[in-house]
Image (cartoon, rainbow, N blue to C red):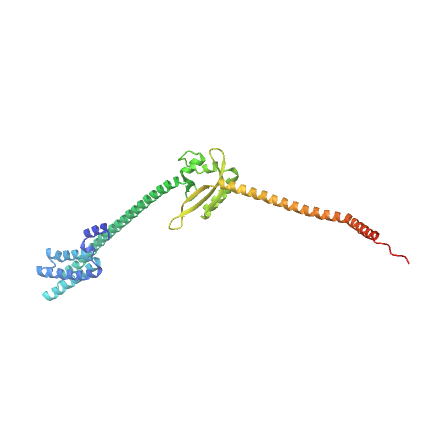
Amino acid sequence: MTTSDQLLSERQPARARLEPASRWPLSVGAAAAAVLLALALAGPLGGIFFSVPLAVLSLSAQVTGAAPALVSTALVTMGLGAWMLSAAGEPSREEALQLVAFLVAGSVIGVVSGSLRAGRARDVEARIAAARAAEEAERRASDTRVTLEALRASEVKFQQLADAMPQIVWACQPDGIVYWYNRRWYELTGIPEGHVDDASWLLVLHPDDRQRCLDVWYESIRTGQPYQVEYRFKSPTGEYRWFLARALAVRDEAGRIVRWYGTSTDIHDAKLTEAALRASEERHRALAEALQEADRRKDDFLATLSHELRNPLAPIKNSLFILSRAARGASEPAAPSK
């Protein structure tokens, strides 16, 4: 129980805190006390003595409630009737009417007093419930304030760290609207520092990259998937430089997106190097193809030359062979004739 509940419980009357099981014995005890008081006063149904048992029953009803009070009234009526029968025999008509009147009056007093008690009990319970609700609301508000202060402190630390980074850092609302840039953004774009406009990044984006970037960005906003794209930003000098943008969604405990954090990294030099390497590869490929073509043409030339040389060399070779045979025949002595 909270402090507020304890304070209300301390002010709550004892009759409103009685457990149902303890009300019935108390009601029976109150009935017995009323009968004994009436007998002790020796005039239970006349003058002031008529009101004494009713007062006891009224007090009992204030503590026990309507139902036990009615039982007490019935018990007191029965007790008084039994005493009247034992003391004077059959009661007179006037005494019987007084006894009935006592029963009716006691019942009415019991119901009214019990209703008042129930109303006070409901009022106490309502005050306790209201105090609990107020304390719970205050606790939640306090927790919310602590959480917001922690988030603000964390946000400040993040922004201070992001301002020292060489990349562009930005933050968006769940619907994709940018609400913060770090210092590097203003240095690279020339936009006045502190100026946050959701459309400002489109103004420095290369026209050829706008639609592609928007399509990818809105798809990430719709699905919650990570965002990644390459585009060109215009620098204060008028030069367009290549950047690689990445963004991730930050979600709460329920999985709802609460914000987006993104970075844009300058990859212009890497892009130029990549383009130079690609151009160099194309030149080497063209040179290799040219060398292959030259080698093929050389082979074709040598084959043609070999074929063309082979045709005139054959008769020359035959002629040389015939001349060599003729020379050998002339150098040999002639055979003697017979």
- The image quarter in which residue 183 lies: top left
Compared to residue 92, the image places residue 219 above or below, namely above
Q: Nearer the viewer, residue 61 or 165?
A: 165
Q: Is residue 47 visible?
A: no
For the point 70% across and 47% down, which residue is it?
Answer: 302
Q: Residue 31 placed where, x, y %? A: 15, 61
Quadrant of the image occupied by residue 194: top left
Q: Quadrant of residue 84?
A: bottom left
In the image, taking residue 284 as reference, residue 40 lies left or right, namely left
* Closest to the observer, 174 or 57: 174
Q: From this viewpoint, is residue 285 visible?
A: yes
Q: Nearer the viewer, residue 301 or 88?
A: 301
Q: Is 196 placed left or right of 327 in the picture?
A: left
Residue 174 location (% of width, % of height) = 42, 44
Q: Is residue 57 above or below residue 156?
A: below
Q: Is residue 66 above or below residue 215?
A: below
Quadrant containing the C terminus in the rendered view: bottom right
Question: Total of numbered circles in the picture?
Answer: 0
Q: Position of residue 307 (x, y in %)?
A: 74, 49
The x, y position of residue 32, in whole percent, is: 14, 62
Q: Nearer the viewer, residue 291 or 154?
A: 291
